[in-house]
Amino acid sequence: MSAPVAEHVLASAVVQPEVLTGFSGPDAPPWEVINTCVHCGFCLPACPTYKLTLRERSSPRGRITLIKAVAEGRLDLMDPTFQDEMYLCLNCRACEAACPSGVKYGELVESARAQIEAQSPRTLRVRSARIAAFRGVFGSSRRFRAASAGLRLYQRTGAQRFVRRSGLLRRVGLAEKEALLPELSERFLVPGKEFWPAEGVRRGTVALLAGCIMSTAYAEVHRATARVLSRNGFDVIVPPGQGCCGALAIHSGDLEAGRAAARANIAAFSSPSIDAVVSNAAGCGAAMREYDFLLRNDPDWAERARRIAGKVRDVSEFLADQGLVATPGPLAVTVTYQEPCHLVHAQRISRQPRELLAAIPELQLIEMPESALCCGSAGIYNLLQPEMSSALLERKLANATSTGAAIIVSANPGCMLQMAAGLRSKGVQTEVVHIMTLLDRAYAALDVTAAAAN
Amino acid sequence: MASALGPATKSALISKLAAIVGEAHVASDAAGLAVYEFDASDEAIAGHHLPLVAVLPGSAEEVVQVVNLALAHDLPVVARGAGTGLAGGAIAARGGILIVMTRMTRIHEINEIDRYAVVEPGIVNLDLSNTLLQQGYFFAPDPASQRVCTLGGNIANNSGGPHCLKYGVTSNHILGLEVVLPSGELTWVGGPSGETSGYDLTGAIVGSEGTLGIVTKAMVRLTRKPEAVAVLLAAFPSMDAASRAVSAIVAAGVLPASLEMMDALTISAVEAAFHCGYPTDAAAVLLVELDGLAETVAEHGEIVARKCREHEATMVRHATTKAEQDLLWLGRKSAFGTLGRLAPNYYLQDTVVPRTKLPPALEFVGQLGREFRLEIANVFHAGDGNLHPLMLFDRRERGAIQRVLEAGDALLEYCIAAGGAVSGEHGIGMEKKDALSLCFTTDDLRAMAGLKRSFDPRELFNPEKIFPSGFSCGEVNQLKQQSLMRDGMYVV
């Protein structure tokens, strides 16, 4: 064929400016993103809510059509079905990974939610509660730790046992939500307070995102992560000044709270001596990688956001790509791997965690069906959409337990809490373990073997 | 007509429908219906037509009840699967009740001895094959959209796919059908033996795009999984060289399971999307799949590689692992959608020429691009001579859609003059109903309309489809005789 005719086609284009009637302001769903959808429907089988409902409005293509209809002024932003669908979406991004046309669906749904939040008097009450949560509790690490400490007190003093037994939770409709509460760590991870030097030949410096829930509920996962990284030649720092990544706020449409979180983290992680910003929470890593989009219209921060976003790595990705210099010890266990949406879909990381698991001698990985289908946790989705969330959790647990594996390996706190709560309520003994905890155990096994040999 | 229903009647109708299928499976609000305004075709084809109400039945009995309710209200009924059609076939062109079949996904029976399965039409094509694979079988028709599209849609459009070169199209794999007729009755046509005495009603219904009935169960043929599969990728310096290699392969007596071509523009989009390993510096690639007994596959693999090299192939690669083969196929089967990266809209033509006419036909496509100022990507079933040029455009550009449609018409006329057909496998739907008169005489069309009327005298089943404008309402208008019409033309 002769040369493509693109140049003169483009030169002759008379592009009509689109009037977006239904949305307003800088956070309107970008028209060029809406327009990337060619409605081929390839996203349908990837979408958890479509899989369960089999109706078009609950599919990514359907939701994009609705967003487009609002943008063109054919559908009201306040249409109840529109609002329902924007929030029934898990924002798991499985559709993005399946989309041949490259539609950035997450940007669309987050922007649409922001529009609803900004203009909805009806949801004011819910909104103010959310804003209090996102800005008040998640907005400051200190306040988050204080709130978490209160929760820890509730768990440790026996109050939790008493309240659970009393039936009070069921009476006020909070039993399911309370069951999701994580068992908090004995010792929270406070940024700036702990440091792990590289062992052996030093390969670089990584900065760990402590995050909110990870730092209080999974502080030990952080310490395991740091030990694994240091054992593989990396200095691990937890820079002070950092806080929540902002993902929970962004996903709920509170973009301003998300931006505030992003700016704080960008400042905290800006030291040029940091080779990589490492996250062990898939949701947080995905959010940080999108700081550049979040702050694209902020002239003071756009460039810095781009720089930091480019340095963010999920810890599995980082370790697998850098290569393990220390061979883990043997773990004779059967595991199955559940892929966090924000790892496999949002960050497209699927191979690396499996490579790390394969590096553990004697460990047997048994793949579960639909490993990349959302478990229904999705940030605070399980609190807001309990019905869909538990249907997905049921499916996930059925898939996971069908393997007969003793351990479900994951890489995101939300999924771990969700699955652990589901298994607990069923009385199933299967353990839910973060991949870094498993690697840390493998290295510990090495130490035990070495000690025995001496 | 839908608009004739008063609000009270409409609300009574919706209550009755809810009583049949359940309230959760009825959509009648603005947003719930807006999502059914389109399928995967461009809106220039599908237009803007909303159903009055959409229902998602869960069983054949529910479909029967819905259809009878529609008949009582004189409302059109249109069946829809996953909405991946490219010709507007599932659009409720005259409103009425849209029957969305996606919830009907059960497999009722798998009979390995008689080699058939009885399944519901909402099942996704690939889900059906994956289930059958557990017993060593598969469902052979594999449209590129097979991860998404439903069996019902495959039956409606008599769909093909890359593997229909060797295995044939959907009609070759449907043994019988349970159908809700436009009279409101539920009946079976065909059966496990595949032999029919008298009229081949299964044959009439496959490909009828929901105009003769709504399929509620299908008896599908099971095809044995081949012993060996080989996938070869060959790169060429021109589309012309690749086309000549296609003819050479077939002339050498090799019948590949599939023989697909992609041009440079398509490769660039596919690689941007999925990093499948297609050479981005090639002007064209052939993706050849061979299957059968291991010895034959190996021997034919050598012949294919040799024929490609004889026709200027710059690279021939065997995809040895299953993962590598799957990745190449992922790229090919997602190719249409990847072109959404290059332009906001595309118009996909589906047309056929005899295999030997491929080189001039592709040259003609190139000319059209220059003449109508369009970027055109080619990705198609080369083995069948089934072209799929995708004309890229931006609807916001003034006059773009007109140029696209004119180029599409010119291509159809060219292909028919070359001895081809108006549609390879995507159906007629709304897109090509006027083009039918390019290759059928008024008498042909009148005969087809007679069949339609004997099934559906009230013209309530998927109206405004297949037949040229002016052919509806029982009137047989005199159609303009096309200058291209002549003896010897055939339709596949």
Image: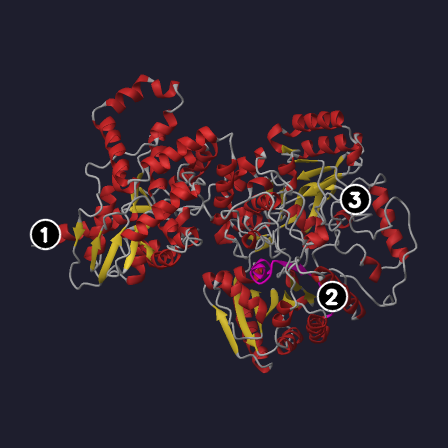
Q: In this figure, which residue is indicated by the disc labeled 1?
A: A451
Which dot, 2 or 1, sits closer to the camera?
2
How packed is label 3: few (under 14 Cα within 10 Å), some, or many (20 or more)?
many
Residue type of the residue flagged with mark 3 = Pro
CA–CA distance in space, label 2 to label 1: 78 Å
CA–CA distance in space, label 2 to label 3: 27 Å
Q: Position of residue A361 (x, y in %)?
A: 25, 55
Q: Position of residue A355 (x, y in %)?
A: 33, 57
Q: Secondary structure at mark 2?
A: helix
Q: In this figure, which residue is indicated by the disc labeled 2?
A: B407
In which image quadrant can residue A271 be found?
Answer: bottom left
In which image quadrant can residue B376 be found?
Answer: bottom right
Q: Earlier in the sequence, mark 2 or mark 3?
A: 2
Quadrant of the drawing holding the C terminus of chain B: bottom right
Give the left or right position of residue A275, taking residue B387 as reference. left
* Magenta stretch, residue numbers: B336-354
In the image, residue B9 sits, relative to residue B450, either above or below, namely above
